[in-house]
Image (cartoon, rainbow, N blue to C red):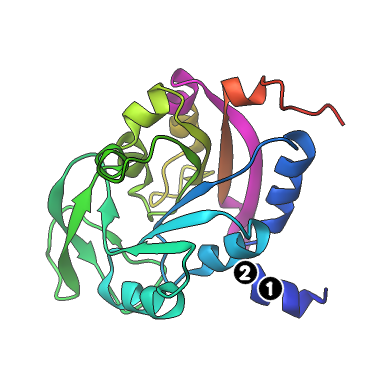
């Protein structure tokens, strides 16, 4: 496959992660994938390529982004689109929403003209309402709201009902947008998760040659030690 075709079908570069999971956990299946902060469906596209039989729940509260997401993926029987923010409480919250920008995010107060009120629920409440007992893969990309979204899945996490967790995380002290990796490690390790992989590294800037952020993938420790694991 050419690089251009690869970027078209896998814009978020999920295929290499899928290969790693298949290599070390050949007997497991990823039946349910949660994409929290789906934007217009970039990760949905990649997951449909990497895990073609997986059911995807895509969450995007920004109105224009959700409209584009729904238009692109709403008719796909394996994609369920939801105009919702996920956080640590059930509430209506202000969101900075500039078209379909990937920097749209939940804010503490509506002080700008380009903020809108959006509905927010928790992952635990959503799963209970949909009778979803197990989430195979939870990916969160919420532009600084990631920890709140993660904590909304506390019951699922503490009971081992999530297999993998992927978060966008900050890697230097100048980055005040993304939650530091150390914070995620502290929370997730206490809940029984361990680091599995790093991907999508980004520099602080073109002129600053140190890392700003990346995506960190954690695995449920019980799954990592399961009989399904391969040592190859």
Q: Residue at x 44, y 30 (%)?
A: 161
Q: Are marks 2 and 1 in contact (CB under 8 Å)?
A: yes
Q: Of 120 and 226, which appears nearest the observer? A: 226
| Quarter of the figure with the N terminus | bottom right
Magenta segment includes 150: no
How many residues crowd mark 2 within 10 Å: few (<14), some (14–19), many (20+)? some
Secondary element type, mark 1 = helix
Q: Is residue 191 above or below residue 88?
A: above
Q: Position of residue 69 (x, y in %)?
A: 40, 73
Separation of disc 2 and disc 1 at Cα? 5 Å
Q: Position of residue 213 (x, y in %)?
A: 54, 50
**Residue that carries the numbered disc 2 in the rendered image:** 11
From where the camera sits, is residue 205 visible? no
Q: Of 48 and 37, which appears nearest the observer? A: 48
Secondary element type, mark 2 = loop
Q: Is residue 201 above or below residue 207?
A: above
**Residue that carries the numbered disc 1 in the rendered image:** 7
Left or right: residue 35 versus residue 113 is right
Which SS does the magenta portion mostly show? strand
Label ID, residue 107: none
The magenta stretch is 186-213
Where is residue 117, by image quadrant? bottom left
Left or right: residue 117 versus residue 5 is left
Q: Residue at x 30, y 61 (%)?
A: 105
Q: Of 115 and 43, which appears nearest the observer? A: 43
Magenta segment includes 203: yes
Q: Residue at x 54, y 43 (%)?
A: 171
Q: Position of residue 130 (x, y in %)?
A: 30, 46
Q: Position of residue 139 (x, y in %)?
A: 48, 48
| Quarter of the figure with the C terminus | top right
Left or right: residue 218 versus residue 8 is left
Q: Of 219 and 130, which appears nearest the observer? A: 130
């Amino acid at each position: 496959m050419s690089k251009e075709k690869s970027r078209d079908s896998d814009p978020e570069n999920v295929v290499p992660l899928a290969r790693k999971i298949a290599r070390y956990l050949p007997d497991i299946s990823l039946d349910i994938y949660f994409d929290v902060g789906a934007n217009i469906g970039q990760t949905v596209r990649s997951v449909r390529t990497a895990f073609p039989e997986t059911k995807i729940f895509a969450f995007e509260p920004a109105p224009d982004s959700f409209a584009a997401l729904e238009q692109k993926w709403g008719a796909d029987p394996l994609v369920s689109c939801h105009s919702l923010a996920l956080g640590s409480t059930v509430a209506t919250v202000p969101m900075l929403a500039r078209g379909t920008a990937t920097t749209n995010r939940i804010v503490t107060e509506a002080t700008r003209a380009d903020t809108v009120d959006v509905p927010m629920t928790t992952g635990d409440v959503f799963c209970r309402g949909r009778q979803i007992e197990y989430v195979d893969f939870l990916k969160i990309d919420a532009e600084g709201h990631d920890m709140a979204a993660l904590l909304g899945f506390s019951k699922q996490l503490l009971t081992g009902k999530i297999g993998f967790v992927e978060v966008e995380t900050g890697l230097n002290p100048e980055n005040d947008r993304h939650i530091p990796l150390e914070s995620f490690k502290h929370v997730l390790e206490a809940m029984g998760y361990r680091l599995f992989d790093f991907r999508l590294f980004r520099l602080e800037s073109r002129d600053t040659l140190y890392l700003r952020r990346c995506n960190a993938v954690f695995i449920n420790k019980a799954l990592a030690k399961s009989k399904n694991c391969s040592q190859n």
